[in-house]
Image: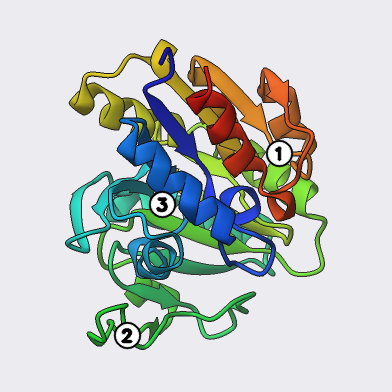
């Protein structure tokens, strides 16, 4: 096969809107691995949200998480490496954003644990109580910003209130984009901030290099702005039918099917049939 690795986003791409994986998707992922096609999950999710994906899909390889800030072994459930924002950068960026956008609220992904400001409002379950083996997970921390800034974080989350998602991201980019990497993966005014140069593309490139796979041998598929660097970098790139306009513009091919229509499963079948 000319394609040796399929790099796929999860939410809105491989997974259906309800967060599940179809029987067809599970079957195709297993068949792809049997055929020697490397499957890489490349996601904005932190490790604490990856065990459920491994259980749902049956895939237990290596995942690139937190928008490229870390790699995670789905089988052993361990972080293999991480690229964090240092405490000084976190303090500087949050100070600038709070001064210019007073209503902004922050949360921190540290790798395996999570902390948030008292007025930070979540769009999802904060953290599962246990992993797929039944092991208890770390409890998330509710604390003032000064405490959140006490250690490095792989991802800074900034939530705007009552703001249009793209406009909010653009505003954050203008204010701190020269110091950090700014993106988003959802449909609310929530931006995800990583260290400079850390993107899904950088994380995928490191994984591919480790496996001796060139970018020309990689097909990537996604749906949101945080997928854009990966879609621009990979040898082949695809956006699902339900993708954000920026992902569609970055991809070389727009798939006819959406995530709810098993778009990635059909793509893998096409790759295996070559």
**Alpha carbons under labels 2 and 1: distance apart:** 32 Å
Could you say whether the residue bearing mark 1 is in a helix, strand or loop?
loop
Q: Badges 1 and 3: C-beta atoms under 8 Å apart?
A: no
| Residue drawn at point x = 56 percent, y = 60 percent | 23
Percent of width and height locating residue 66: 41, 52
Q: Earlier in the sequence, mark 2 or mark 3?
A: 3
- Residue 240 badge: 1
Give residue 206's quadrant in the image: top left
Q: Residue at x 56, y 33 (%)?
A: 269
Question: Quarter of the image holding residue 102?
Answer: bottom right
In terms of depth relative to the viewer, which is nearer, 194 or 99?
A: 194
Q: Is residue 245 left or right of residue 7?
A: right
Q: Which residue is mark 2?
A: 130
Q: Is residue 217 visible?
A: yes
In primary-sequence order, the first of circles 2 and 1 is 2
Distance between the alpha carbons at the discs numbered 2 and 3 = 20 Å
């Amino acid at each position: 096969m000319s394609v040796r690795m399929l790099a796929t986003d999860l939410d809105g791409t491989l997974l259906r809107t309800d967060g599940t994986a179809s029987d067809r998707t599970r079957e195709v992922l297993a068949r792809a691995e049997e055929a020697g096609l490397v499957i890489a999950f490349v996601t904005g999710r932190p490790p604490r949200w990856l065990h459920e994906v491994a259980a749902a899909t049956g895939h237990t390889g290596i995942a690139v998480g937190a928008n490229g800030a870390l790699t995670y072994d789905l089988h052993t459930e361990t972080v293999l490496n991480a690229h964090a924002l240092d405490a000084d950068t976190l303090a500087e960026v949050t100070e600038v954003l709070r001064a210019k956008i007073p209503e902004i609220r922050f949360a921190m992904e540290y790798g395996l644990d999570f902390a948030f400001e008292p007025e930070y409002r979540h769009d999802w379950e904060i953290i599962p109580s246990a992993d797929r083996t039944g092991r208890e997970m770390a409890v998330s921390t509710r604390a003032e910003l000064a405490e959140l800034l006490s250690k490095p974080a792989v991802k800074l989350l900034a939530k705007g209130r009552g703001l249009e998602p793209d406009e909010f991201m653009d505003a954050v980019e203008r204010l701190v984009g020269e110091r950090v990497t700014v993106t988003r993966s959802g449909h609310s005014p929530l931006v995800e901030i990583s260290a400079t140069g850390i993107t899904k593309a950088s994380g995928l490139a490191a994984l591919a290099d480790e496996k001796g796979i060139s970018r020309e041998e990689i097909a990537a598929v996604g749906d949101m702005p945080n997928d854009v660097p990966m879609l621009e970098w990979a040898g082949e790139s695809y956006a699902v039918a339900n993708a954000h306009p920026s992902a569609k513009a970055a991809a070389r091919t727009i798939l006819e099917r959406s995530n709810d229509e098993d778009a990635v499963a059909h793509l893998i079948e096409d790759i295996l049939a070559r």
